[in-house]
Image (cartoon, rainbow, N blue to C red):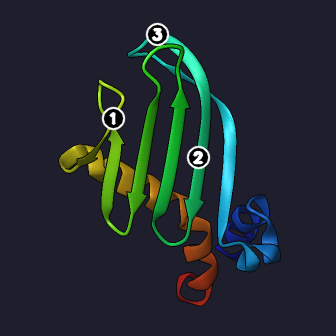
């Protein structure tokens, strides 16, 4: 288990991970539902703040999560608070983003 944890933590920055409190990811995403691609920006700040900007050609989408509350763009381009599965999906994205730190902090419990 130690070797696996070392590999995962190394992929996320190794020992320097302890000093990282937030990160930004930029990329391209392809939506099967919209049948288009667009640029994506994801900002994550520990433990549960998330911002996702999906810049599709039509209908760009933004998602915000802060301390268990979530918002996203509505079809008219405004921002609307969400609950249910839309909120749960953002909570899950934030939890996944936090995994390297959780593994690092709980290493003695896991090994």
**Relative to 82, residue 23 above or below:** below
For the point 29% across and 32% down, the residue is 74
User: Given the current orientation, which residue lies at the most extreme top position?
Assistant: 35
**Horizontal relation, residue 29 to residue 48: left or right:** right
Name the element at disc 3.
loop
**Horizontal relation, residue 73 to residue 109: left or right:** left
The image shows residue 31 at horizontal and vertical percentages of 47, 20
Nearer-the-camera pick, 80 or 30: 80
Quarter of the image with the C terminus in it: bottom right
The image shows residue 84 at horizontal and vertical percentages of 18, 49
The image shows residue 63 at horizontal and vertical percentages of 42, 44
Residue indicated by mark 2: 42
Residue 78: give its label. Answer: 1
Looking at the image, tell me whether mark 2 or mark 1 is earlier in sequence order.
2
Quadrant in which residue 86 is drawn: top left
User: Given the current orientation, which residue lies at the most extreme left position?
Assistant: 84
**Relative to 47, residue 23 above or below:** above
**Horizontal relation, residue 16 to residue 68: left or right:** right
Quadrant in which residue 97 is drawn: bottom right
User: Are the two marked residues, 1 and 3, in contact with CB atoms closer than 8 angstroms?
Assistant: no
Quadrant in which residue 69 is drawn: bottom left
For the point 53% across and 38% down, the residue is 53
For the point 50% across and 50% down, the residue is 51
Report the Cα–Cα distance between label 2 and label 1: 19 Å
The residue mark sitting in front, 2 or 3, is: 2
Residue indicated by mark 3: 35
Nearer-the-camera pick, 5 or 100: 100
**Relative to 67, residue 105 above or below:** below
The image shows residue 2 at horizontal and vertical percentages of 70, 76
Report the Cα–Cα distance between label 2 and label 3: 21 Å
Quarter of the image with the N terminus in it: bottom right
Mark 3 Cα within 10 Å, few/some/many (few <14, many 20+)? few
């Amino acid at each position: 288990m130690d070797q696996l944890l070392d590999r995962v933590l190394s992929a996320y920055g190794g020992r320097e991970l302890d000093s990282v409190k937030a990160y930004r990811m930029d990329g391209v995403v392809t939506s099967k539902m919209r049948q288009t691609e667009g640029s994506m920006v994801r900002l994550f700040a520990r433990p549960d703040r998330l911002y996702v900007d999906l810049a599709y050609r039509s209908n760009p989408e933004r998602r915000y999560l802060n301390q268990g509350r979530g918002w996203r763009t509505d079809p008219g381009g405004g921002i609307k608070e969400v609950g249910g599965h839309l909120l749960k999906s953002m909570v899950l994205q934030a939890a996944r983003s936090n995994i390297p730190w959780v593994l690092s902090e709980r290493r003695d419990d896991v090994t």
